[in-house]
Amino acid sequence: MDNRIRIGLALRMILVGAFTTAALALCGWTVTAGRAAVKATPRTVTARGPLLSGEQSTVDLFEKARASVVYISTQARVMDTWTRNVFSVPRGTGSGFVWDSDGHIVTNRHVVAGATGGARVRLSDGRDTEATVVGVSAAHDLAVLKVDFTNLPPPVPLGSSSDLRVGQNTFAIGNPFGLDWTLTTGIVSALDRSLQTEDARGLIEHLIQTDAAINPGNSGGPLLDSAGRLIGVNTVIYSPSGASAGVGFAIPADTVNRVVPQLIAAGRYLRPSLGIEIDEGLNQLISQRLGVTGVAILRISPGSAAATAGLRGLRTERDGAIVPGDIIVAVNGHAIDSVARLESRLDDYNVGEIVRLTVLRDKQRLEVPVRLQSSAQ
């Protein structure tokens, strides 16, 4: 290569380097010739100090309750239309918690509904097993599973929902979106809420409303108070937008403590009953025609609690005219406006308890005491 070419290339490289150095200098950067060795060490961590008392209590609550919360996955059996082979596919996930030392797990009914391929329960220590369904109550969206584990974690301590107050702290533990053992916190936003059951034929009463995040996968997990006691079972989020943003609801602990023992003992929940026949469609027609709000008794079952109390159903005159019978307008002073409301009000009591019905009979208001019977009678 010609010396003049070499000199030209060298000058060009020097000019480019000078320009780059000047540009970096304008940007506030320091340029050094070559790459000098720089000694860099991690910064010193600033000591945090102890957690705030509120933080520490939340951490303690989660660490104590975590082991008693379980992850539930369900399977559904499907058939290949070409081969006719039947196989299981994942259906969904949810949460649950240990109810007693006998291996009973409480969750939502909708978590296991349709799980034709079975359900599995996984503990926080990684142990996993098949679960059997002991009983379900669609009216309360509750279900009980049974697992066989040795050294089962302790049951979640049971609290009361009757003395809750708006503003109390709430803590929800579950597995939202498959993200296992997640804690969310909030407060009791409201009490005594009502929502329709999944089939829209009944009401779930006395629900706890909370702003603690309850998302898909949280269903069936426990809602705890600041003492770590069970005050509800997380069941649904109400979201007008359809997204996982809204208010959450939990089945109150007092309802859970009344329903779950029956599911364990009998596999089903037998609701308190009056022994009468009622129908929402006919009830609406009768109420509109008579201009009253209540539940019309269509028929009294012979030998039932209602028959013993002297209640009256519809009757037909010789000329074919239908004469209304008693119309129930209140139970123990609580107004009744639909069949679903009547059933949910009666569900607040136990079989054998006496309730005071307020009825309209021939335009007169009467108080009639009735001893509740089992719906199986």
Image: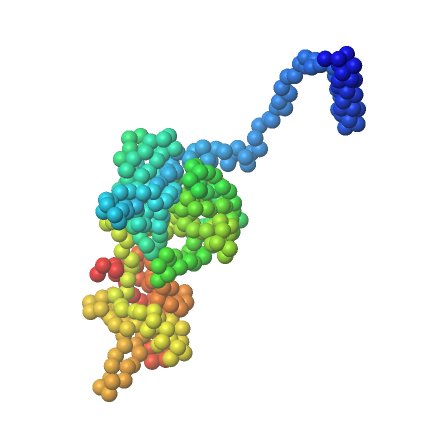
Above or below — where is 328 with respect to 142?
Answer: below
Q: Nearer the viewer, residue 296 or 121?
A: 121
> Which color scheme did the rendering employ for the protein?
rainbow
Residue 372, given in percent of the width and then of the height, sits at: 28, 61
Residue sticking out furthest to the left: 303
Q: Is residue 18 visible?
A: no
The residue depicted at 43 percent of the width and 46 percent of the height is 216
The residue depicted at 44 percent of the width and 38 percent of the height is 179
Q: Nearer the viewer, residue 263 or 177?
A: 177
Residue 178, given in percent of the width and then of the height, sits at: 42, 40
Q: Is residue 96 left or right of residue 264?
A: right
Residue 98, given in percent of the width and then of the height, sits at: 34, 39
Above or below — where is 370 with respect to 143?
Answer: below
* Quadrant (top left/top right/bottom left/bottom right) for the C terminus: bottom left
Residue sticking out furthest to the bottom: 319
Q: Quadrant of residue 74?
A: top left
* Quadrant (top left/top right/bottom left/bottom right) for the N terminus: top right
Q: Nearer the viewer, residue 201 or 161?
A: 201
Residue 234, given in percent of the width and then of the height, sits at: 42, 47
Q: Quadrant of residue 316?
A: bottom left
Q: Quadrant of residue 331?
A: bottom left
The number of numbered badges drawn on the structure is 0
Q: Is residue 16 visible?
A: yes
The residue depicted at 53 percent of the width and 49 percent of the height is 167
The residue depicted at 69 percent of the width and 15 percent of the height is 35
